[in-house]
Image (cartoon, grey):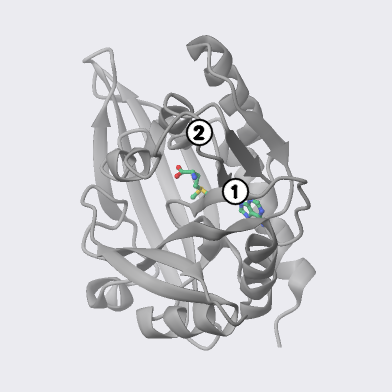
Amino acid sequence: MLNIPVKVSPVTLNYEVWATLYDKVYGDVVDDIPYYVNQITGPDHAVLELGCGTGRVSIPIAEVTSKLTALDLSGQMINVLKQKAVLGGLILDCVIADMRYFELDVKFDLIIIPFRGFQSLLLKDDQEKCLAAINKHLKEDGKVIVDMFFPSLEMFDQDNRVFYEVKRISGEDPRTSTLVKHRSSFDMHSQLIETTLLVESSKADLVTETRYLDFTLRYIHPKEAEYLFLNNGFITRNIVNNFTNSIENQSSEMIFELEKKCDY
Ligand SMILES: C[S@@+](CC[C@H](N)C(=O)[O-])C[C@H]1O[C@@H](n2cnc3c(N)ncnc32)[C@H](O)[C@@H]1O
């Protein structure tokens, strides 16, 4: 039996640390953004993003609707998002809260959890709490979108002592670049992937900074995910597969499109 405080609080702390590096490491992940923006039907479309982070997806959404609420547990992540919104002259509501327990007095047309945020919930019980909170805040004809990834066989086979190269990102100054490597180990019983990212910044071929960032995600098989959603009040209407350019690009990225189950 997992102990919630031990498993969940370090993850939360890690995301506070992440805020300063998140955009450097994931700013180049853009393939999913048109998909989310295309879901917005007009400037009054009420959208809630859970686990919004520094606003990689929130900022483009706030450009097409004035009714975005962006929620994250990390105050540091939200601070970065707020600065970007001010710079872009964009209006959005920012909320620091836990996606398992939030209480807002608004109902939404669309609730999204992009880029694996749902997988930060490390217990099935946490995922069910989050789905209950979503159900409470979703309009009857509303839509939910949850992005998850399922690790590839290659990933399961990797040596958990080795850092594997993920990508090298060029900086605005052509002499600078950021190398990202990952080392992951699997807890197959609890379906957890514990990853350390090594983020190495260089200028003119000299390493200027090396940072290590840890995070843990819970992976679930697509069929198991469908049953989890079904048992918690949602029908899976569609699964959109594989945006490229994700962090472990051989793994399958799946976007689950959900609707409320009528009799729930
Ligand atoms: C992988 S990032 C995704 C950020 C952003 N949505 C994107 O697409 O780039 C996951 C985010 O979920 C947040 N998070 C993790 N656990 C959370 C929880 N229990 N409640 C709310 N946010 C949480 C983290 O702070 C982090 O910002």
Say whether mark 2 is within 8 Å of ligand 1.
Answer: yes
| Amino acid found under the numbered disc labelled 2 | Gly
Q: Is mark 1 on a helix, strand or loop?
A: strand
In the rendered image of this protein, does residue 247 appear above or below residue 82? below
The answer to whether residue 24 shows anywhere in this view is yes
The answer to whether residue 51 shows anywhere in this view is no
Query: Disc 2 vs disc 1: Cβ atoms closer than 8 Å?
Result: no
The answer to which of 234 and 223 lies nearer the viewer is 234
x, y percent for residue 243:
24, 53
> Residue 3's image quarter?
bottom right
Q: Badge 1, how many Cα within 10 Å: few under 14, some, many 20+?
A: many
The numbered dot on residue 108 is 1
- Residue visible at 32% across and 51% down in the picture: 247
x, y percent for residue 227:
48, 85
| Amino acid found under the numbered disc labelled 1 | Phe
Q: Name the residue under label 2.
A: 55
Say whether mark 1 is within 8 Å of ligand 1.
Answer: no
- Residue visible at 75% across and 72% down in the picture: 4
The residues bearing labels 2 and 1 have C-alpha atoms spaced at a distance of: 19 Å
Sequence-wise, the earlier of marks 2 and 1 is 2
- Residue visible at 60% across and 27% down in the picture: 92
